[in-house]
Image (tube, rainbow, N blue to C red):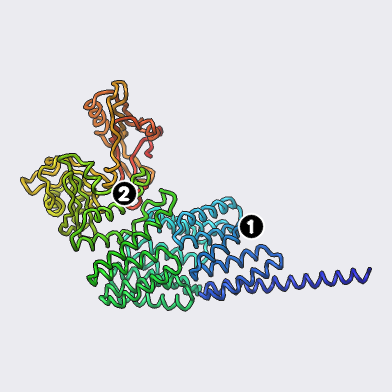
Amino acid sequence: MRALLQFVFLMSALLRTSLHAQFDRASELAAAGESELAKGKYEEAVRHGSECATMSLAAGRTDQHIRCLTIAGRARVYQGKYAEALGVLQEAATLARAHLLQESEAAALIDVGSAQYYLGDYTNSFDAFHRALNIVERQRAQRWYPRMRQIVMANLAMIEQRLGHYLRALDMYRALEEGAASMRPSEIARLQSNIGALYRRLGDPYKAISRYEAAERLFAQQRDRDGEIGVATNRGIALALDIGDLSGALAAFERAARLATTSGNRREQAQATLYSSEALRRLGDLEKARTKAELALSIAEELKASEETWKALVSLGSIAEDAGKDDLAITHFRKAIQTIEKLRTGIAAITLRAGFLGDKIEAYDGAIRVLLRGHPDPEEIFHDLEQSRARSLRDRLKVALGNVARLRGQLNHGEALVEYWHSSDRVAALWITRQQATVIPMGSLSGRAVEDLISSLKSGSDQWESRARRIAQVLLDPLPLQGVSRIRVVADRRLQAIPFEALPLSAGGRLLVDHCEVSYLPAASLLAAGAAPRGWMPPWNRMLVAFAFGGAEPAKDLFDQSLPPLPGARSEVLAAAHALGGKAVLHLDEDNRKNYVNSSLAETPVLHFATHGVADHEDPDRSRLAFSTPANEVE
């Protein structure tokens, strides 16, 4: 019996020694895997991470098992093997949740969200990041809280940026910079690179390059190969597309492509190859550009990376357009649009879709531009125009795309709809009446001309008339306005800022508003939706509900924008009530509160707002009307 006990004790000791040895070896493999990730050696990182995970599981070390699964999963993300990565990372998140390892679960969820982001699955990516944030926010007392919160918020900002919510993303990045002390150097470098990309989108390439250079220095210090590749590509994009240094950009792209090919980062290889193609196209080397774009498309399709796929298709469309191959160009642009529409449809939350088409409009513009070179079919032009118009609003109202034939049936005699297209400095219009539909090519109009008109109108300068005349020569003179008593305008981009009523007609010098009634639509399809007909109303029903912005002093809205008093708002509302007759409910001055705007207004024929309206072109969901609160603050 004593001998048996000694044998059992000896075997237990040997087992413990073996487990300790396995744990020590697993720790070595984990350290090696993390080092290989930073150096861009992804195949080695996958192998060592997987081996470490197996050993840690055998040693009963769940925390290290999760750590090693995460290493292997991240390496697969860099390789572009997103489906494999998701399986491993979701396993890590599930294990961490089961063992109440909050930091590990949050980290795994962040990686899950990143893999979904690269697949274009923005809804689930957004959800994964928010789940991680909820875990982190419940652990404020932990030492790891500040850094982990920064990482989650940086990823959420990245999603907002990708979806076109640039101002939201900028606000988030500014807050992140204030707390950057809790982040590691490579994490700060990625933050700098993302901010640089955002500044480029906001039209400041020099500030973008400054951020890229700061990121490059940090990545080089940390020997972070993946970071170096990404920032080299971003720097090249700014040089090529914004500054015009095509040779410098091409060198940056080719360096990034070499690094990505060596490390096995297929997504970055696709990105660098794609932008090399664009630089070559702008340099006039169409054959080399086509070869690069086809390679980029092949890699993107292999990875199922939708963002890179549509970009490569747009590049191929532009190359075919430059070569005069219009049919091939249209084919590529149409495929790009199909990919974009599939991406957009996959975003479940309507609020996330606002701004999504911001950086993707070039696909729709490319199709329209090529169609205009021939004899464009109004139905085709309408379809491409409307696909890029007021999509979030149409989603909320559940309005279908419609067609030209239906629109013509919605218009009365003497009524016309003009839908403008404005890309770069080119303008065209789709003209629709009850009798006909036609596409009208127009002259060129710069964004600066529009801004000058608006500036002179705001300042009361006498120059507004000459500036309005020049714009009217492009936008109104080609239109067959004779016999038109009402015109509905669907403006595009910068043209949305123009008060068309104030544009003069060439015949007689009258303003458009003196010739016909002018109204506006964000999309022509909204006219096809129609309005429910109203029958006779009893006199005791409300005819009007009106709101007048009050206060004798300037106020600030929720976004800290200053709003001056509107001394005529009260008299405007009273005049509207007098003109309409019938029962009216008026909310004046401090009683002009948002909580009165609710479903009970649905049956009121006329709503009148005499208040400030702010149109936010960068982030449509932040467009707003100003209301007072009981404390006389502004919402």
**Residue positioned 40% across, 57% down in the render:** 342
Disc 1 residue type (three-letter) = Leu
Question: Callout 2: helix, strand or loop?
Answer: loop
Image position of 99 with respect to 559: above or below: below
Closest to the camera, between mark 2 and mark 1, is 2
Real-space CA distance between mark 2 and mark 1, rounded to the nearest whole angstrom = 49 Å
Residue 533 sits in quarter:
top left
> Horizontal and vertical percent for residue 458?
21, 46
Q: Label 1 belongs to which residue?
A: 101
Image position of 72 with respect to 155: above or below: below
Is the C terminus in the top left, top right, bottom left or bottom right quadrant?
A: top left
**Residue positioned 30% across, 63% down in the render:** 333
Q: Label 2 belongs to which residue?
A: 401
Image position of 363 with respect to 623: above or below: below
> Horizontal and vertical percent for residue 186?
50, 68
> Horizontal and vertical percent for residue 549?
31, 35
Q: Estimate how packed mark 2 is, as few (under 14), some (14 to 19) or many (20 or more) residues with alpha carbons within 10 Å.
A: some
